[in-house]
Image (cartoon, rainbow, N blue to C red):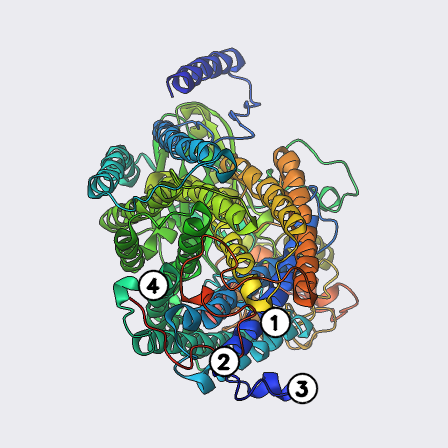
Amino acid sequence: MGADHHGPAKGLTRWLFTTNHKDIGSMYLWFSFAMFLLGGSFALVIRSELFQPGLQLVRPEFFNQMTTMHGLVMVFGAIMPAWVGLANWMVPLMIGAPDMALPRMNNWSFWILPFAFTMLSLTFFMDGGAPNFGWTFYAPLSTTYAPPSVTYFIFAVHLMGMSSIMGSINIIATIMNMRAPGMTYMKMPMFVWTWFITAFLLIAVMPVLAGAVTMMLFDIHFGTSFFSAAGGGDPVLFQHVFWFFGHPEVYIMILPAFGVVSEVLPTFSRKPLFGYSSMVYATASIAFLSFVVWAHHMYTVGMPIAGELFFMYATMLIAVPTGVKVFNWISTMFRGSMTFETPMLFAIAFIILFTIGGLSGVMLSLAPLDFQYQDTYFVVAHFHYVLVQGALFSIYCGVYYWLPKWTGHMYDETLAKTHFWMTFIGVNTAFFPMHFVGLAGMPRRIPDYSLQFADFNMLSSIGAFITGFSQLIFVVVLLKCIKGGKSATDQVWDGAQGLEWTVPSPAPYHTFTIPPQVR
Amino acid sequence: MLRAQHRRRLMAGAISMAALVLQPALALAEQVERSDTNMRVGATDVSHQVYDLHMFSLWICVAIGVIVFGVMFYSIFAHRKSRGAVAAHFHESTKLEIAWTIVPFVILIFMAVPATKTLTDMYDTRDAALDVQITGYQWKWKYSYPKEGVEYFSSLRTPRDEIDNLAPKGENYLLDVDEPLVIPAGKKVRFLVTAADVIHSWWMPDFAVKKDGIPGFINEAWANVPEPGIYRGQCTELCGKDHGFMPIVVRVLPEGEFNTWLASRKEEAVEERALMAQNFTMDQSMERGKGVYEKVCAACHQPNGEGIPGAFPALKGSAIAMGPMEGHIDIIVNGKAGTAMAAFGAQLSEVDLAAVIVYERNAWGNNVGDMLQPIDVANFKKGK
C-alpha cells in the first residue's frame, strides 16, 4: 500500500496527540463502552429499588439522580459517542479516504468528552447531589428548584454539544470532499449516507440545546425569566425548545443504526440491498419530518387543538418512510442465501424489536391515546425498544461486523452468540413487561409503586440484571479477539462488498494514501 | 374489539346494579376495572372511546407485525444457505415500493379519523355544570370550588411505615389520600389545572384525563362520570423528590349527596374563618402548628426540623426561626424568590400560618417563647 512510512507513536502521547481516524475511532468506542457500563450500573440501581414495592435501597432524592444520570450518560455518553466512533473508523475506509478531513479537530472533539463526563459525574459528590430533574430537565424543576450542581450540568452539556458539532462538521467535510474518484453520492454505502444526514441533524439541533441550557443558566444566575411565568416567561417554552432538539436527537441515535443494518443484511443474505435509492430518500424524509413533530412529546401541556392535530398527523407520517425501510430490509433477505453469524443475529433482532418500538410509536402518536400513555411505563417500554433493542443492538451489530477488520482476528463465534442470546432474552424480559405496567397505569420516574404492579416490576428487574451481566461476556469476546484468534481474511465475510474489505485485516495504520478507483 | 365492548357493557351493567343495591350506603364501591396488562376501560364516555381506539390501533399494529414478521420468518427459514438456497439478484421494484408507501398511508388515515373525533370531544369544555380548580404543589394537590368558596389540600395517606417496609402494605398502598376530590355523578365537571411551584400532571386514568399543571397557566379538561364511586390516579410529571407520593383520588357522589357534602364544607369554611378572632394559647398553637408542619413543611424540612443538607435548610437552630418574628412571618407568607421555598400566604389560613410559625419557633429546642395570633398574620399581610 505504500502506507507504512510511519506507524503509531509510542506510549500515552500516541493517544493524547493522535490525529489518526482509527485511533480516535477506537478511543470513542472504548469511552462509549465505559459510559455504557456506568449508565448501566445506574439502571441496575433503579431496577434494584423497583424490584419490590416499598423503599429498600435508596431514598427518593437519590433515585431521581439515578434516573437523570442514567438517561444523560446513556444518550450523550454511550450511544452518541459509539456512533461517532464507528463513523471515525469506517467512513474513511468506506469512501476510500486516507483519514478524516479535519484530523486535529477530530482529536479535540474526542478529548472534550472525558472531561465533560468527569465533571458531570463529580456532581454526585456535591451538596444537594447530582442533577435530579430527569434527562429532559424541564424548567422550573431544573432552574428554581434544582440543586446547585445544575450549573456544572449546564457546562457539561455545552461541552458535549461542542464535541458533537465538531464531530459532525468533520464527518460532513470528509464525505463531501474526500470520496474516492468515481464514488458519486448515490454510490455511497448506506452507513455513510445515514451518517451524512445524521451529521446535518446534529449541526442543526445541538445549538438549540445549547440555547436551552444557556437560558437556564441566565434564569438561575442572572435574574432572567425565560422559563418563569412570574417574570413574564413560560415554562412550556422550555419544552418547545428542548424537544425541538430532542426529537431530532432520537433520530440522531437511530439513523446510523439504519445504515449499519443496511450494510450487514446484504452481506449475510449474499444479495444486494433492496431499493437503495428509496432507502436514501426514506432516511432524508425521516430526518426532515423529525423537525416538525417535536410537540408530540407535549400533548398534555395544553396546546390548542389545531396544534395537537398538526403534530399528530405529522408524527403519523413518519410511519411511512420508516415502513419503507423495514419492507426494504425484509425484501433484501427474501430469496437471499442467508447465514446467521452474530452480526446478522443482531441485525434481525434489530428489525423485529425496532419494529415493535415503531408500532408502539404509532400508537403513541395518536394524541387522545397519548393522554393515557404519556409519562407512563408504556413510554419507557417504547423508547427502550427503539434505543436499546434499536440503537444499542445495531451498535453491537456493527462492532461484531467490523471487529475482524479492526483486530485482524475472528472473534469467538460461540461466545458472541451466547452474548447475543443472553442480551436478547435480558432486554425483552426487562422491557416487554413495561408495556403492561404502563398501560395498567404505572407512572415513570417513581421510586415506589402500588401493589398491582409488583409482579411485572420484579420480572423487569430480573431481565435488567440478565442484560447487565451478559455484557461481561462481550468484554471477554472483545479481549480474546484483540489478543488472538483465527486470522481474518481481507474480505472477512464471503458476502461482504465495499472498499473497507479491500484493505488488509487488521487495517494498517494508514489506508488509501493512494485513492482507489470506484467504477 | 367486539368482545372487549361486550365485556365492558356487562361490567357497566354489573356496576350500575351494584350501585343500586348499595345505595344509599355511604361506603362507595371502588369503580376500578383494573387490568394488570391493559389500559383501563374507564368510567366515562370519553374513556370508552379512548379504550376502543387503543384496542383498534393495537390490533392494527399486531396485524402489521404478524404479516411483516411472518414474511421475514418464512424467509429466514426457507432462504438459508444451509438449506442450499441460492441468492437471487433482484434489488428493486418500483411497483412494490409504491405499494408499500401507499398502503401504510391509507391505514394511517383509518386511525387518524377516529382519533381526531375523540380529540375534538376531549377539547370541548363548554357548558360545564361545575368548575373545579386543581393546583399541583410539591407534593400534594389543592382542590378548590371557586364559586363556592371551598378549598382544601389532598395529600398521601399511606403511612410512612408501609413505605419503609416496617408495616404490611395496605390494599390502596400509595393510592390513598386524606381528602379526595369530590364531584357529582352525571354532571359535566370542568377541571382547571395549574400548579404553584413546578410542573405537575393530573392523571385520572378512569376519565382518560391527563393535563399538566403549569405554574402561571391554566389548562382545561373535563369529565362526566355517570357512576358514583372512588377513582384513583397519580401525578405523572416528575416534580421532585416525592413525585411518586402524590396520588389522586376522586370520589364521585350522587348529585344529592354531593350537594349535602358541599354545603357542609361551606359551613366548615365559615367556622374556620371565625377562628381568626380567637386568641390561641401556646399549647393550642403548638398542637395545631405541629399538624400543619407535618402536613405542609415536613416533606422538605423533615419532621425533626433538620432539613436535607444541600437541598433543604434546617429549621432547628436556624437564624430565621430563632430571629425576629417579622422575618419569620415574611419568609413563610412570601416565600423566598429563586428557591424551592414557596409563598404560603395564599396556601394556608391565617390560623394555620400563625400556628405553624409558633411551632417552628418553639419545637426541637428552638425555645424562642414568643407568641403569634392569627390577627397578627392578617395585619402583616395587610401591611404589605
Of tags 2 and 1, which is closer to the observer? 2
How far is the residue under mark 1 from the one under mark 4? 64 Å
**Label annotation for residue A510:** 2
How far is the residue under mark 4 from the one under mark 3? 36 Å
Q: Chain of mark 4?
A: A
- Judging by the rendered image, the residue that carries numbered circle 3 is A11
Q: Chain of mark 1?
A: B
Looking at marks 3 and 2 on the same chain, the residue that comes earlier in the sequence is marked by 3
**Label annotation for residue A193:** 4
Nearest the viewer among B53 and B216 is B53
How far is the residue under mark 2 from the one under mark 4? 23 Å
- Judging by the rendered image, the residue that carries numbered circle 1 is B328
Q: Give above or below for B61 relative to A162.
A: above
Instruction: Where is residue B244? Give x, y as percent.
Output: 59, 48
Of tags 1 and 3, which is closer to the observer? 3
Of tags 2 and 4, which is closer to the observer? 2
Residue A151 showing in the rendered view: no
Residue type at numbered disc 1:
His
Disc 4 secondary structure class: helix
Nearest the viewer among B215 and A408 is A408
Looking at marks 4 and 3 on the same chain, the residue that comes earlier in the sequence is marked by 3
